[in-house]
Amino acid sequence: MSIFEAYESGEHESKVSHFAAIVKLAIIDGPINPEEETVLKRLAVKLDVSEEEVKPILKNPGKYHLIPPYSLEERIERFHDLWKIICADHEIDEEERNLIFKYAIGLGFTTEKANEEIEKCMQVFDGDTQFNINLSEQRAKTVVNELIAQGIDSERMDSKGFGENVPVADNSTPEGKANNRRVEFVKMNVPKT
């Protein structure tokens, strides 16, 4: 086996163990509900976990030990995957919070960093207004920066984030929240100089 093959094999094992951790969170509050099932299917595809691998994980997720990824970016992404499953049933109980804290430590975060990431996710989940405005502004700036990178003159663009202050849909449903996370382009009539 080459070094590359060993690395790929280890990376896949890490993804499988991550998926098992997500399943553990999904079943902590009872049987997997339809929303959780949808999230699990998406994450299995994202993590390249096959249907044949998913079946035994669903039967016994505790059999799989956590294998954290190497990069901080991947660890944060995995941590946020866990929040997707927690938020699927629209409530977070103390047992889920404790388990996600343990998982964050298992991913290699310090206690301080784990609590910081949990707090950020809780703010998003709870709809902290200022946090959402900052996130919205960051999203808008990212789009403008990408357009600038594609060659559009920066003088022709501006960005503004509104958070949850300008919804286009009911923010009490997952679908509405998804529709409200958007970037809009508005053509401005600016006189030529």
Image (cartoon, grey):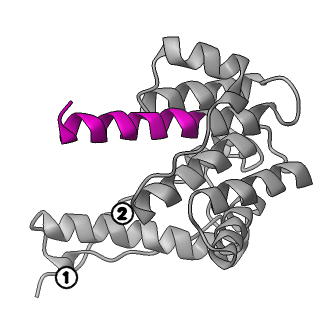
The Cα atoms of the two marked residues, 1 and 2, are separated by: 15 Å
Instruction: Please tell me which residue lies in front, 175 or 82.
Output: 82
Observer able to see residue 61: yes
Q: Which residues are magenta?
A: 1-19
Report which quarter residue 74 is drawn in: bottom left
Where residue 103 sits in the image (x, y, percent)?
67, 53
Which disc number belongs to residue 186?
A: 2
Reply yes or no: does residue 3 show up in magenta: yes
Task: Please name the residue shown 35% across and 60% down the image.
Answer: 185
Q: Considering the whole magenta stretch, tell me its main secondary structure.
A: helix
In the displayed structure, 169 sits above or below 134; it is above
Report which quarter residue 114 is drawn in: bottom right
Q: Which residue is the site of mark 1?
A: 155
Query: Residue type at mark 1?
Result: Glu
Instruction: Please tell me which residue lies in front, 167 or 87.
Output: 87
Q: Secondary structure at mark 2?
A: loop
- Residue lying at the far front in this picture: please name it: 1
